[in-house]
Image: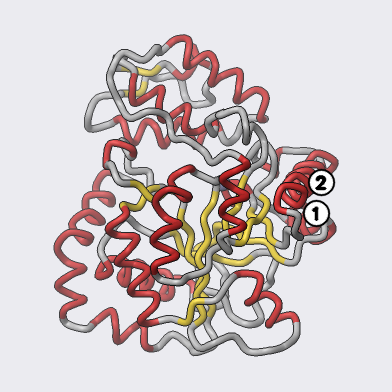
């Protein structure tokens, strides 16, 4: 996103969305959503402290906004669990009018400590897609190491060529106005590398840019006891691969192993079938979709932005990423997804 576009978005969030919502403009648009639509919303982290989200990369929602968003979903949609919705569609049964399912990716600890009590207070189901690699080693997810390194460094510039980051050679600014854009560019570039190469580049970054600033600690993940506690609390646990690599870059054998191993680990942990898969970071293609079907999952969710329909392909289900904003701006985000994509889950 350009700086100008992000400024426009920020103004919309703060000022325009509440005004347009007050005029009923979003509600009029949202009333046109077909009763048969199935909205799947996507969260990553739910946080109490804004310092936990230094670059506002769209992965964090505050507890207050999360609460407001769930209250809105309760009022305007029919919440339904992922597996239950898939089961009904497989039998040709209708979903409740304007069905809505809640999903979380990546298994962050705050899903257990912050989000779970809020979900319970609204009696809402959710599905949680957890990568199984390093679950009990307190190993951070790799992009959180990137975020933490670039948040805590005292360096003003990042030198992609020296670090092996595949970006054109010029130095990237880590100054206050540019650092979020730099982090986004670095992460996008790292996703294009084979996983082991990426980890080498990341280790090089950490050595070259030691922490000198006091910042929020690196984001923590749930361990397997907490994942089991979520399962026992009624949260559906889904697979999200082992290493959370870009599956489009992996061999077919590795893709299958990532899917099947993560599924088996979670089935053993929960002593229950694991039905859903979330493509890591949404990377998928015809081969990974086929692998998900053949690995015995009942459905797979993507990060394609859209709202689903009873005839949507249940191995490329679209989702709507939740903004860290008020309900007024959440409605704007939903309207914009529907206007852009319709309700067929296509992007
Ligand atoms: Zn993920």
How many numbered marks, from 0 up?
A: 2
46 or 202, which lies in front? 46
312 or 152, which lies in front? 152
Specify whether tag 2 is near ligand 1 (CB below 8 Å): no
Whether the residues at callouts 1 and 2 have beta carbons within 8 Å, the answer is yes
The residue that label 1 is drawn on is 291
Residue 283 visible here: no
Q: Please, is residue 193 above or below residue 31 in the view?
A: above
CA neighbours of label 2 inside 10 A, class few (<14), some (14 to 19), many (20+): many
CA neighbours of label 1 inside 10 A, class few (<14), some (14 to 19), many (20+): some
Please tell me which residue is depicted at 63% across the width and 43% down the height of the picture: 131
Q: Please, is residue 131 above or below residue 23 in the view?
A: above
Q: Secondary structure at mark 1?
A: helix
Could you say where residue 13 lies in the image, as x and y percent from the top left?
A: 22, 60
Please tell me which residue is depicted at 51% across the width and 55% down the height of the picture: 104
Could you say where residue 244 lies in the image, as x and y percent from the top left?
A: 63, 40
Q: Please, is residue 23 above or below residue 174 in the view?
A: below
Could you say where residue 273 lies in the image, as x and y percent from the top left?
A: 76, 60
263 or 222, which lies in front? 222
Please tell me which residue is depicted at 54% across the width and 34% down the height of the picture: 141
Which mark is on residue 256? 2
How far apart in space, not on screen, are marks 1 and 2 (Cα)?
6 Å
Q: Secondary structure at mark 2?
A: helix
Display colour scheme: secondary structure
Could you say where residue 194 lies in the image, as x and y percent from the top left?
A: 67, 30
Q: Which of marks 2 and 1 precedes in the sequence?
A: 2
């Amino acid at each position: 996103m350009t700086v100008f576009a992000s400024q426009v978005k920020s103004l919309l969030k703060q000022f325009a969305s509440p005004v347009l919502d007050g005029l009923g403009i979003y509600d009029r648009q949202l009333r046109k959503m077909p009763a048969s639509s199935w909205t799947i919303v996507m969260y990553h982290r739910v946080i109490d402290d804004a310092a936990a989200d230094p670059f506002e990369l769209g992965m964090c929602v505050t507890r207050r906004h999360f609460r407001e968003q769930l209250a809105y979903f309760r009022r305007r949609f029919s919440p339904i669990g992922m597996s239950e919705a898939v089961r009904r569609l497989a039998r040709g049964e209708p979903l409740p009018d304007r069905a809505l399912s809640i999903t979380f990716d990546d298994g962050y600890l705050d899903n257990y400590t912050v989000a779970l009590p809020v979900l319970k207070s609204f009696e809402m189901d959710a599905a949680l897609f957890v990568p199984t690699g390093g679950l009990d080693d307190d190993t951070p997810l790799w992009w959180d190491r990137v975020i933490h390194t670039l948040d805590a460094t005292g360096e003003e510039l990042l030198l992609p060529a020296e670090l092996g980051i595949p970006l054109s050679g010029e130095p990237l600014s880590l100054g206050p106005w540019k650092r979020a854009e730099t982090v986004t560019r670095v992460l996008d570039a790292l996703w294009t590398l084979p996983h082991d190469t990426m980890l080498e580049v990341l280790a090089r970054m950490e050595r070259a840019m030691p922490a000198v600033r006091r910042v929020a600690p690196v984001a923590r993940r749930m361990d397997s006891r907490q994942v089991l506690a979520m399962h026992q609390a009624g949260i559906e646990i889904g697979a999200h691969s082992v290493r959370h690599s870009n599956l489009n870059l992996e061999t077919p054998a590795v893709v299958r192993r990532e899917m099947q191993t993560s599924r088996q680990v979670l089935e053993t942990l929960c002593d229950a079938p694991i039905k859903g898969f979330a493509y890591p970071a949404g990377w998928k293609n015809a081969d990974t979709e086929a692998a998900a079907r053949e690995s015995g999952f009942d459905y797979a969710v993507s990060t394609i932005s859209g709202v689903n329909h009873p005839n949507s392909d249940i191995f490329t289900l679209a989702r709507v990423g939740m903004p860290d904003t008020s309900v007024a701006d959440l409605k704007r985000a939903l309207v914009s997804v529907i206007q852009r994509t319709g309700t067929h889950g296509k992007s």
